[in-house]
Image (spheres, rainbow, N blue to C red):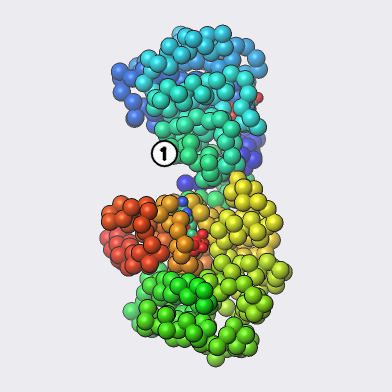
Amino acid sequence: MRIFSKNEMYNIDQETMEKIGLNNGMLMENAGQAVAREIESRIKKNDKIIVIAGKGNNGGDGVVIARILKERGFSIELWMSHKGGSVAEDAQRALKIYENCGHSYKIYEENEEAFQISLKKSTVIVDALLGIGTKGKVRGPYRNIIEEMNEINKIIYAVDIPSGLNADKGEVDVAIKAHTTFVIQGAKQGAFLFPSANFYGGIKTVDIGIPSSVIEQNSYVKRRWSKNEVLSSLPHRDISSHKGTYGRALMIAGSENMPGAAVLSSKAASRSGVGLLTIGIIENIKSIIGSHLPEAMYNLHQSHQGMLSEVKDYSSLQLDAIGIGPGIGRNKETEKIVEEILKQQVTLVLDADALFHVKPHLQKVKERRFPTILTPHPGEMASLLDLSIKEVESDRFEKSREFAQTYGIYLVLKGPFTIVTTPSGEQFVNSSGNPALAKGGSGDVLTGMILGSVLQYENVQKALSNAVFIHGAIADQLVASTHSPLDVLATDIIEGISPLLHELYREKEYSTGY
Ligand SMILES: NC(=O)C1=CN([C@@H]2O[C@H](COP(=O)(O)OP(=O)(O)OC[C@H]3O[C@@H](n4cnc5c(N)ncnc54)[C@H](O)[C@@H]3O)[C@@H](O)[C@H]2O)[C@@H](O)CC1
Ligand SMILES: Nc1ncnc2c1ncn2[C@@H]1O[C@H](COP(=O)(O)OP(=O)(O)O)[C@@H](O)[C@H]1O
Ligand SMILES: [K+]
């Protein structure tokens, strides 16, 4: 599923009209036809359906839907929101065609009570009040209509966007709570931001025939990353390979107060395919960690001061990737270690305390010639950008892209709908996971999974998106089978890596013959 910003959608629309020659009326007809087909497959002949249409082009889509469904013999009442006023040109034309077919419509303004009665009798409502043109707080009759529709508690199918929502941002004033939203040509960014994502219900894309060349030229790549993408990109192990083929990784994690972070991240890295793993820790936590992961090698230091002197010459380890951050703490030494690590000519994964330390050194990150991956949660992202968490969360796509492009990094902005952004600004939104993951340690596990994963793929983005998907899918599977949303531990996620990978590889084998 493609994802668009409002401006991208308008530019796509404009170019389709100017260069391709499909005019807005044709696109509206296509949109209405496509959504009507989807609705038709979900309704019954005895349903009483209300289509409520606004003054803009979204309303025009609604008018087309009402006409098509009426022609197919469904019981449809079309309501226009406004009495008179400036209805968009193509919506006016759609209404004329509707009338030419001998159909009539009603108007909400000055008929509020009749609308209430109709709402009560209805079984299905089609929301075509407002689309991507919505700006600021909802005004006029729209506000009342939206509130009345939500109160009546019927099935609502929204066209393009649940009316009232902003296409690009997560914040919500008042909006339709949809059962399903039929998004035109692709979802809008707000479908993956909170709280607006809570209003969409199910999302189904309808194709209105916009040429793909126009889409490619007028939008950044932004798409959802789901199981199909994972299955088609899982790495293959060649029969003649050996442990060196799958990379040498170092995970620098943990400290006296947070030894567990080293266990979680290292174990997750091991379970994610890495050939040879070395754990870089301070000596006095070795006894806690060693029993958990006999497979790993150790790079031990009496203190972080001692570690710092060795970091400067890691060539003997012949590393391919370093992960750093979970539980290392925040002090002068750990900051210097992070600064030194940035000079290493290997793939880097920076998380947690390493993200705190990297902030003054972002210029050095920009100069790196090897992949640098940052995995902030919204709080860490806000701190890196000197913004509030709210400012980040409401605008995750743009904020991520600007940051990734400015510093030439891969960014994994965590949270529900984790976004992976590449240095060139392509974005992939994860589709797995649930609030069972909202618990200390699950991020450490993801860091390990990412470190293990990057060494298995030629394409860094695929490695990141797949690690993020698998991490979330394990939580989904635990909640669906043996756990509740309350009791999933980070260690349960690690234990879930093998069963999930097993299942994915079996499915891949089945679907591709590999
Ligand atoms: N390629 C595309 O994107 C296509 C889009 N179409 C539809 O057109 C929609 C966009 O149409 P428009 O640009 O006309 O915009 P909308 O239909 O979303 O709404 C614009 C109308 O709402 C009013 N309005 C805006 N903000 C408001 C607020 N806060 N309170 C009250 N009124 C407000 C405006 O004054 C205007 O009358 C899409 O969402 C989609 O449904 C289709 O018709 C055809 C193709
Ligand atoms: N509500 C949620 N839905 C889906 N995933 C979530 C949710 N809350 C947290 N997560 C995931 O859990 C992980 C938490 O990471 P992080 O905040 O760094 O945790 P910690 O610092 O405790 O290790 C991230 O991968 C994040 O995407
Ligand atoms: K709508």
User: Residue 169 placed where, x, y %?
Assistant: 60, 41
Q: Is residue 471 left or right of residue 185?
A: left
At x 47% / y 46%, what residue is drawn? 1
Q: Is residue 305 left or right of residue 204?
A: right
At x 43% / y 57%, what residue is drawn? 437
Name the one closer to the observer, 184 or 285. Answer: 285
Q: Amino acid at mark 1?
A: Gly
User: Residue 318 placed where, x, y %?
Assistant: 53, 87
The relative height of residue 355 versus residue 13 in the rendered view (above or below) is below
The relative height of residue 424 versus residue 140 in the rendered view (above or below) is below
> Local crowd at mark 1 within 10 Å, few (<14), some, or many (≥20)?
few
Can you see residue 460?
yes
Can you see residue 462?
no
User: Residue 97 placed where, x, y %?
Assistant: 52, 15
Q: Is residue 273 left or right of residue 351?
A: left
At x 47% / y 62%, what residue is drawn? 440
Name the residue tied to disc 1: 202
Name the one closer to the observer, 58 or 449. Answer: 449
At x 36% / y 57%, what residue is drawn? 487
The relative height of residue 75 versus residue 214 in the rendered view (above or below) is above
